[in-house]
Every structure is written in C-alpha cells, then in structure tokens.
Amino acid sequence: MSTREASVAGAFYPKQEKELRQMLAGFFKGLTAEEKSGCVVSPHAGYVYSGRTAALAFNALRDSDCFVVLSPNHTGYGDPISISAADRWKTPLGSVKVAKPERKKILGALGIKADDAAHVQEHSIEVQLPFLQYKFHDFRILPITIMEQRLQELVKLGNALAEFGEKISIIASSDFSHFMPLAAARQVDAAAIKKITALDIDGFHEMVHRQRLSICGSSAITALIQYCKKSGFKKGKLLGYDTSATASGDETSVVGYAAVKFEK
C-alpha cells in the first residue's frame, strides 16, 4: 500500500498534531454558520498567511464521503492532469484514503493514467487536508493536480466530475494575485472573482490568459466552474478576501487569498 507522506508539514503548517489542532481551532473560532455547499475555492499558502481565509471556505463546505481536491501544479513535474496513484495521503492528523472507484472512473473518462510525479512535492493539495481532517470524519479524497491550461480540456474534466453529481464535494485550491502592490492586487482579484461568482467560465479563462493573471489555481477554478454549471449551481458567493499584507505588514508585494462557495 503506497502512502503519500506529508512534504510541507513544519513549513506551511505545524508538524506537531497538538499545535496543528490548536491553530486550526483558532481559525474557526467565532465564524458564523454558513449554508453548506459542495463546491468551494480555498487558498493554499502558509497557514499564518491564509489559514483564516481557508477556514471561511471549509466552514461553508458540505460533508461528503469523497472530497475532490483540484490544485495547480507548481513543480512542473508529471502529466498535464495528474491524479494521484497513492492509496493514502498522510498529514500530522493521520492518513486519508484515496477514492479508488472514483479515480478509476475519472481516469477512464479522461483517457489518462494515474501519476504521482506531480504530487510528491506539491503543497497545494496537502495543505487542504488538515482542514478536512479537522472538520470531517470517515471520508476519502481524490487529489488532482492540473498543469493543463486549454479550456476544452478543463471543461472535459469538469464534465467528468459532474457525472458524480452530489456524491462528491470539490475544493479548488488557489491563491490569487502574486507579488503585486496591495491596491493593484485587490483591484485585479475583485475583477476575477466577479467572473468566478458569475460562473462566467469563458470570461474568467480569457481574462486570466489575456491579462496574464498570476492566479495559480486558475485551471482548477475553471474546471470547478464547469462542474458547477453542469450540476445546477447558479452563482458563487465571496466569503472573504485577504492578502499576505495582513500577516507580513508589507503592502508593496502581496499575495491575494479568497474563499468562495457556490450556490444553487
């Protein structure tokens, strides 16, 4: 049985279980109840920067037997769309089973093979898992890392996921603008989020590529929008927006973080 070991514990989030649980509890403290959704966008930076924003997304996420986590590929390794071949993923909070029947179905629909090269050092799925483990129990995951940029291929992935209907919940792992002045990042991200919440898949994809936006998980978000359109979702709702400046104090070069849920 193959296990994908935690690669960024102790860097992006605490390595010790007790400390990690305490940090997660702090992020969720005081959050108001949200109507639950099966689809959210959540950031994936170090927890001191984006943990509170991520908690807003997970606070609105519906429980599920299978959570699909769509992420960008930061390493450049692996296939254009890479579905983890591992049996389990491990974090300081324990291990999580990979959803094998769902993996087999998606691999068949896309005509690809499972690939772990993209996942070995990729942080953007791993950092979502402790939030899932803190909030939910007895679930499986389907980790999908995306380097693909072509709209037709992302639509194909979204359509394949839509075949599962509401048997799955989906997290699109993405940060927003990278290394821009605070005011500029807020402006650019607000325009992109407007396209996302309108489920404007063509407009969002075109904006990202025409303006060369640094939204690292834009492909994951695009595939999620297609899933939402096929699954009867009507709109998205911005739950919260923040930047690295809140933690760092540096407003000259920030990274943006957004929590978004989708509604029927």
Image (spheres, grey):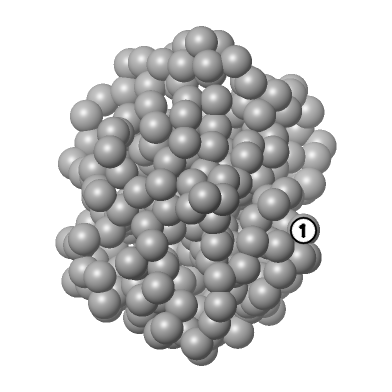
Residue 137, above or below 255: above
Q: Nearer the viewer, residue 51 or 2?
A: 2
Left/right of residue 133 with respect to residue 248 in the rendered view: left
Q: Nearer the viewer, residue 194 or 218?
A: 218
Residue 75, above or below 135: below
Using the rendered image of the protein, determine whether residue 138 is visible from the camera's viewpoint: yes
Residue at image point 40% right, 84% down: 109
Q: Residue furthest front?
A: 1
At which x and y percent is residue 90? 54, 37
Query: What is the quadrant of the C terminus in the image?
Result: bottom left
At which x and y percent is residue 153? 52, 85
Residue at image point 63% right, 37% down: 6
Classify 10 Å Cα crowding around label 1: few (below 14), some (14-19), many (20 and above): some
Left/right of residue 70 with respect to residue 31 in the rendered view: right
Q: Quadrant of residue 198?
A: bottom left
Q: Nearer the viewer, residue 215 or 158?
A: 158
Q: Which residue is mark 1?
A: 75
Residue 263, above or below 108: above
| Dot 1 amino acid type | Thr
At which x and y percent is residue 85? 55, 62
Residue at image point 70% right, 24% down: 10
Residue at image point 60% right, 46% down: 4
Disc 1 element = loop
